Amino acid sequence: MRWFRLHLRSRRVPLAVSSAAAIVALAWVLSLVYTESTTINARTASLTIMLAVVAFGTTLSGADDALDHTASVNWPLRRAGHLLLATAAITALLSLSTLTDARYEPFALVLRNTAGLLGLTALGAAVVGAALSWIAPLTWTLIAVLPFLGPSTDVRVQVASWLTQPAGTTAATACATVLAVTGLLAYALRGGPLRPATETAPDR
């Protein structure tokens, strides 16, 4: 298990977990203090999940791009496992709220949004690199939480605002699933783009 601990440290996973936990806790406290509802609304939950996902987005690349593409390591399996563990970690952090008076629920919505946003982030990491992988999830989330977008029977609206659609909305679930699967496959098989050596060389 030593390689696993080294992998987590090299990807700054402990810092990402701490940041995500702080974000989830802060949103929970604000909801507990300023609202009387026992369920944290979909817009707040979506923004919280997006910020937690962005924190984990920084872990999708290491300090050495060449090492992340070496043939001596089964990187596709490791990358896929990394994403699945990130999904489990964020979902677990959010699920802890079910023990309190302000909750991120239903679970289906939490899982859908976490998987979809992580897939979108992973797709960004595969295309433009982990450092810029936050752009797509941030942009789509800000669009989805716009006041005039909400539960709708229009499929186009359901796709555009899939994050805030009720759990069980077919178009929203399909959109999240496509993003999750596409991002997983793209990141697992390709990893991130190789950066110039000058960008990855240690400072002196």
Image (cartoon, rainbow, N blue to C red):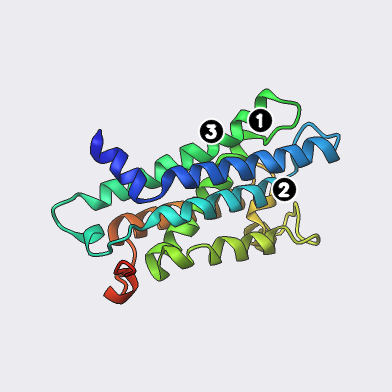
Q: Nearer the viewer, residue 74 or 159?
A: 74
The span from disc 2 to disc 3 (Cα, nearest Å) is 17 Å
Residue at image point 67% right, 35% down: 105
Q: Is residue 112 above or below residue 152?
A: above
Q: Position of residue 153 (x, y in %)?
A: 73, 54
SS for tag 3?
Answer: helix
Residue 44's label in the rendered image is 2
Q: Which residue is mark 1?
A: 97
Quadrant of the image for the C terminus?
bottom left
Q: Position of residue 86 (x, y in %)?
A: 45, 43
- In the image as oriented, which residue stretches furthest toward the left? 72
Mark toward the start of the polypeptide (2 vs 1): 2
Give the residue type at disc 2: Thr
Mark toward the start of the polypeptide (2 vs 3): 2
Residue contact at pointers 2 and 3, CB within 8 angstroms: no
SS for tag 2?
Answer: helix
Q: Which image quarter: residue 129?
A: bottom left
Residue 4's label in the rendered image is none
Q: Nearer the viewer, residue 85 or 181?
A: 85
Give the residue type at disc 3: Ala
The local crowd at label 3, few if under 14, some if 14 to 19, many if 20 or more residues have their Cα within 10 Å, is: some
Residue 92's label in the rendered image is 3
The local crowd at label 1, few if under 14, some if 14 to 19, many if 20 or more residues have their Cα within 10 Å, is: some
Q: Which image quarter: residue 96?
A: top right
Give the residue type at disc 1: Ser
Camera sees residue 168: no
Q: Is residue 187 above or below residue 95?
A: below
Residue at image point 28% right, 46% down: 78
